[in-house]
Amino acid sequence: MTLRTLLFGLIAVAGGGPALSDEIGSVDTAFKLIGANHKIVVEAFDDPKIKGVACFLSMARKGGISGTLGLAEETSDASIACRQVGPIEFVEAISPGDEGERVFEARRSVLFKKLQVVRFLDRDRNSLVYLAYSDKLIDGSPKNSVSAVAMMPWGDQSPGEPLVD
């Protein structure tokens, strides 16, 4: 886990915020003479209210001096893939609303830009749908990525019934 991920995770915990992530790995995309290289980072997080679901995010991270110091504004590019990784168990009630429920957040600039992941419940298809997007105080981005998890039996265990608010 990088220092930056740890700091943002501590901020999220202090504010009662969304799930923490673990850095899985990264690849360099551009060499920078001073400071870290530009790279694509892959992080994973577990849905905080649903055991058995994990999401994997890939996102660009700027290097150079401003990126190394955490001052660069990151791009809105991100990709998400969520999977059932064990028996599905609802440990807390989830919001079934049309606007979904935020399950993950990462800062993409010092003050005003965030990458967010929102979960939706699709009862008709017995699925959980996860949407990753960036927002900004004044002007958000239409760039987004979506992934769905069909709630299936795991071995001999049926998925739990959704607990909703």
Image (cartoon, rainbow, N blue to C red):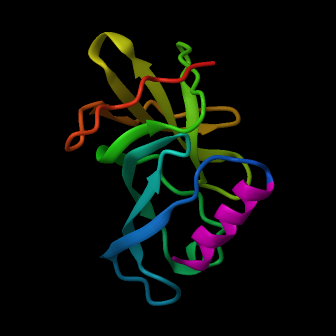
Give the side of residue 48 with respect to residue 128, left or right.
Answer: right
Residue 28 lies in the magenta-colored region: no
Q: Tell me what residue is drawn at x 42 percent, y 62 percent.
A: 43
Decide if residue 78 is in sight here. Answer: no
Q: Residue furthest front?
A: 156
Magenta span dominant secondary structure: helix
Residue 82 x %, y %: 33, 44
Examine the rendered structure and indicate whether residue 103 appears above or below residue 24. Answer: above
Q: Quadrant of residue 109?
A: bottom right
Along the line of sight, the residue nearer the viewer: 118 or 154: 154
Residue 10 lies in the magenta-colored region: yes
Badge count = 0
Decide if residue 126 is in sight here. Answer: yes
Residue 164 x %, y %: 56, 19
Examine the rendered structure and indicate whether residue 96 appears above or below residue 26. Answer: above
Q: Residue furthest left?
A: 155
Examine the rendered structure and indicate whether residue 10 appears above or below residue 150. Answer: below
Q: Tell me what residue is drawn at x 52 percent, y 79 percent.
A: 64
* Magenta part of the chain: 1-14
Residue 117 x %, y %: 50, 39
Along the line of sight, the residue nearer the viewer: 46 or 132: 46
Q: Tell me what residue is drawn at x 75 percent, y 48 percent.
A: 16
